Image (tube, coloured by chain):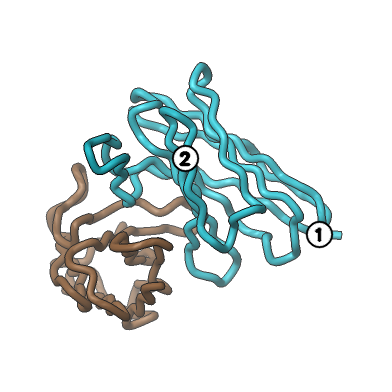
Amino acid sequence: DIQLTQSPSFLSASVGDIVTITCRASQGMSSYLAWYQQKPGKAPNLLIYGASTLQSGVPSRFSGSGSGTEFTLTISSLQPEDFATYYCQQYKSYPLTFGGGTKVEIK
Amino acid sequence: QVQLVQSGAEVKEPGASVKVSCKASGYIFTNYAVFWVRQAPGQRLEWMGWINTDNGNTKYSQKFQGRATFTRDTSASTAYMELSSLRFEDTAVYYCVRDGAAHYYDSGGYWVHNWFDPWGQGTLVTVSS
């Protein structure tokens, strides 16, 4: 199974900050990576797939990069509605697996 | 708009079964695979498997093989997930999710995309004695 390790697990940031979240894979997976945002009590919401393709309707302040074993989700200017937990997910091979999550809180 | 609406919360005793429904709207149901993902308290999201809504073929995570059953009713645009022999550790929110793009067939077989959009609202299944 492909293990995904997200870092940090928790970060505290202010509105307007640039935020970077990393997802590292236990083996190479090309660009078969997606990112999701989850707010408390809600289902996750797709942000990015193919490591860097922004899902329709997602604000352009979100971007993804990386390939192989290291991937990054960047929020260019953190907005109040962005405080949430973010998960990466690999779809290179079965079983599909998720990272442990990064909780972004208000400083 | 594209939407998946799931059935309500369930409380079950250990050893029982639970069946969760997922009604799709806003798109052609049989054009997209439906996946099931669960989220136990304090645990990471966990993929359970998928169903080809066109022909009913299924793929299960090895962890749930033999205990989970995915079915669908195309006339009702509804997918179902049944989990049997429930254990305390099956307490979780269960999500149905649509594949991120339409499935397709080619000379190599049947293909899904394996990223998820949109998600159902989730169904809390509590296993308690």
Chain to which mark 1 belongs: B
Q: Which residue is nearer to you in this view: B15 or B7? A: B15
Sort mark 1 into few (<14), some (14-19) or many (20+) by Cα contacts within 10 Å.
Answer: some
Q: Is residue A41 above or below residue B56?
A: below
Q: Residue furthest right?
A: B129
Q: Which residue is nearer to you in this view: B50 or B127? A: B50
Q: Amino acid at mark 1?
A: Ser
Q: Judging from the image, what secondary structure is the residue with disc 2 in?
A: strand
How many numbered marks are there?
2
For the question of whether residue B18 can be seen, the reply is yes
Image mark for residue A23: none
Instruction: Please name the residue shown 65% across and 43% down the image.
Output: B82
* Chain ID, brown in image: A
Sort mark 2 into few (<14), some (14-19) or many (20+) by Cα contacts within 10 Å.
Answer: many
Q: Amino acid at mark 2?
A: Ile
Instruction: Please name the residue shown 22% across and 38% down the image.
Output: B107
Instruction: Please name the residue shown 30% across and 52% down the image.
Output: A46
**Horizontal placement of B56 versus B9: left or right?**
left
Instruction: Please name the residue shown 22% across and 56% down the image.
Output: A48
**Horizontal placement of B128 versus B121: left or right?**
right
Image mark for residue B128: 1
Q: Is residue A14 above or below residue B125?
A: below
Chain to which mark 2 belongs: B
Instruction: Locate the N terminus of chain A by quadrant.
Output: bottom left
Q: Is residue A70 above or below residue B26?
A: below
Image mark for residue B51: 2
Q: Colour of chain B?
A: cyan
For the question of whether residue A105 can be seen, the reply is no
Label 2 to label 1, Cα distance in Å? Answer: 28 Å
Instruction: Locate the C terminus of chain A by quadrant.
Output: bottom left
